[in-house]
Amino acid sequence: MAGIYIHIPFCKQACNYCNFHFSTSLKLKDELIAALVKEIQLTPTFSANSTSSTTLNNPEEEREIIDTIYFGGGTPSILDITDLQLLFIALHTRFDFKDSIEITLEANPDDITPAKLSLWKEAGINRLSVGIQSFIEEELVWMNRAHTATESLQCINEIKQAGFTNFSVDLIYGSPLLSNEDWKRNTDLVIEKNIPHISCYALTVEPKTVLDKMISQHKKAPIDTEKQAVQFLLLMDRMQEAGYEHYEISNFAKPGSRSKHNSSYWQGQKYYGFGPSAHSFDGSRRRWNISNNALYIQSLKNNTIPFEEEVLTPTQQLNEYIMTSLRTSKGLSLLIVENRFGQKTSSALLSASEKWRVGGKLLFIEESIVLTKEGKLFADGIAADLFF
């Protein structure tokens, strides 16, 4: 089984920190939805093993069973229900949905209304990922978010009243305005509201973003990485006390509420990516679409999917497994490394990780290498050090 990611590249306004592909103009929305439908029609299933740069659908291809669908962006909640229905029709034409399929829609609080929630549920959406980022008004203004703190709280009540039991909220920590006390207040609200899943990210200054420019011009304060580390430690302690599973570096869930779709990425499973800038992965080959709405639309009008691709070498596949598995609570399985890449590689990895174990950053548990609480502060650096 595979997953599907659909990139919706539209937002009401640009957040200062965001470097994802999006546009604040909706004038190409209808054409882009039509292009998405065409891409879904043209993309061969993984079982077809196509390697051509322009792909045409074979109607006789085996229909693949899809386990998860994720509408990301951008802001998918900006779409009309008719847009979503067109995409669902196209997906049903090409794929079979697993009975227990997880279908997630990213949504911003200012787009959420009881009427929309009802329509989303009727269309088949059974999980929401809500970009709250903060419950503090000053923080939202600093980030240039389109919603208010009141809307942050209100949308959670409306989601519950609409009958959604599977949903997540995003929060950002480590901004110059966010005190430790305010960060505790944000996490406490998640717990008080009984939110089943939370994704938390340290504020990152990405190149060429508004935030990057404003910091370089001394219009905004720089990021304090030591404060970020303190707030991450506070987060881990608070969520553990409240009974949440820290199942991936940035993700916490109540038992039974983990994100199936995102988990598939960390487990190296196959997934299709539709839309401008979207990535696909078939286990050894990665492809990515052009990050340009107009060119994406024009290519699909000509029955061509505008993408580039690369075939991962065994070493690249190993390094990807190291990077993704270390981020999870299960950790890096030496048995999986041995089965996929050989016993010598597994032994070399165990030897290379010894210094991190001695330093208290890693644990060896049942043939797996797992980050300690302190080690989670250095996850990316440890993974990079273990790369082949």
Image (spheres, grey):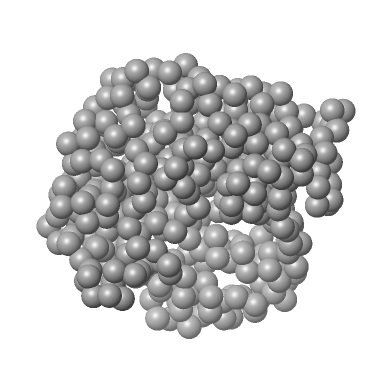
Q: Quadrant of residue 310?
A: bottom right
Place residue 371 in its image quadrant: bottom left
In the rendered image, the vertical position of residue 261 relative to residue 386, given as above or below = above
Q: Quadrant of the N terminus?
A: top right
How many numbered discs sit on the rendered protein?
0
Q: Is residue 253 above or below residue 235?
A: above
**Residue 323 relative to residue 308: left or right:** left
On screen, residue 61 above or below 341? above
Residue sitting nearer the eye, 222 or 268: 222
Name the residue located 64 percent from the left edge and 22 percent from the top edge.
89
In-front residue for pair 309/36:
36
Q: Residue at x 46, y 25 (%)?
A: 80
Which part of the image, by quadrant, shows the C terminus?
bottom right
- Could you tell me residue 306's position as x and y percent? 71, 50
Q: Is residue 362 visible?
A: yes
Q: In the visual, does 217 lie left or right of 288? A: left
Residue at 72% of width from left, 57% of height from top?
308
Which residue sits at x=23%, y=69%?
Answer: 220
Residue 375: x and y in percent read: 39, 70
- Please provide percent x and percent y for residue 323: 55, 65
355 and 178: which is toward the camera? 178
Residue 227 appears in the figure: no
Where is residue 386, by image quadrant? bottom right
Nearer-the-camera pick, 370 or 140: 140
Q: Residue most toward the front?
A: 27
User: Of all residues shown, which one is farthest toward the left?
Assistant: 181
Image position, residue 24 (x, y; %): 42, 45
